[in-house]
Image (cartoon, rainbow, N blue to C red):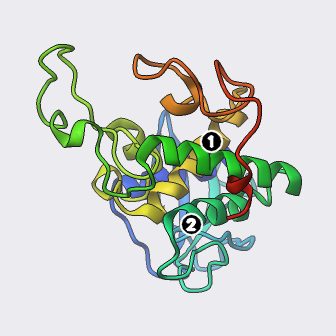
Amino acid sequence: MASLLLRARRTLAANNVRPAVGAVLALTVLGAAIVIRAAPAGAISLGRTAADLSIVAALGGSEDPEVAAVAEVTDVAEDDPCRPAPGTPIPNMVAEIFRCRLAGHLAPETAARVAAEAVVVAQCESRFDPDAVVFDGAFVNRAHPRTGMRYTATGVFQFIRATADTYLEGGYAHATDPVRNIEAAVALYLDNRANGGRGWESWECSGVNGAFRARSVLPGWPGGPPTLPAWAFEL
């Protein structure tokens, strides 16, 4: 169900679809694609999740074998308990969103530790600058003369274009929105764990998976420190 939920959210975001509040949709799986169409007025609704664009989906329960889920789409931005208050500093925003979103997935102690890790990773990746772009954006639209590659990492958690288009609501065009960027980081972290990873392997500052760093900023990762800084738990 979680996989279908994520795929549905990505499909809507990728197509800039903002359904009306309370709209009921049926998600029909046709090969590798998901087709979104109107469902009967009496379609099943199982509740709602706290997200700007939330989809609640349940597998099965349909007489149509092609219909894999019935979903209710709800815009709950105003009453989302995980949405930070206006003016919240970026470091606090990172900690608050991670703690809140992880509450339903991890034990409280683990969620608090991961939130502290998130703060440390974000500090390393962008210095908490939501407008940060790697190489100051010089190679977003043209190749680097030495590597021949383009570098698009942007925002608090430095999402590259392809990853942002998969995880970030609205795609790469909204990578400088700190809330969307942080929410996408939570989703990617959880996806990595769900696929057998440790969560932070997608980021250079933690996973040390590229040519930019030799040491991780996280304990237990390559070259990482013995402990997290105390301040990371205080936000």
Quadrant, the C terminus:
bottom right
Return the residue at label 1. Answer: 189
Q: Which mark is residue 93?
A: 2
Residue drawn 73% across the image and 73% down it? 47
Give the residue type at disc 1.
Answer: Tyr
Q: Secondary structure at mark 1?
A: helix
Give the residue type at disc 2.
Answer: Met
Query: Is the residue under label 1 in contact with that under label 2 (CB below 8 Å)?
Result: no
Whole-percent x and y of residue 54?
A: 58, 67
Q: From mark 2 to mark 1, how far is it between C-alphas?
A: 16 Å
On the image, which quarter does residue 233 sit in? Answer: bottom right
Sequence-wise first label, 2 or 1 = 2
On the image, which quarter does residue 141 sit in? Answer: top left
Image position of 50 with respect to 12: above or below:
below
Residue drawn 26% across the image and 31% down it? 151
Whole-percent x and y of residue 122?
A: 52, 47
Whole-percent x and y of residue 97?
A: 63, 63
The reply to whether residue 66 is in sight is no
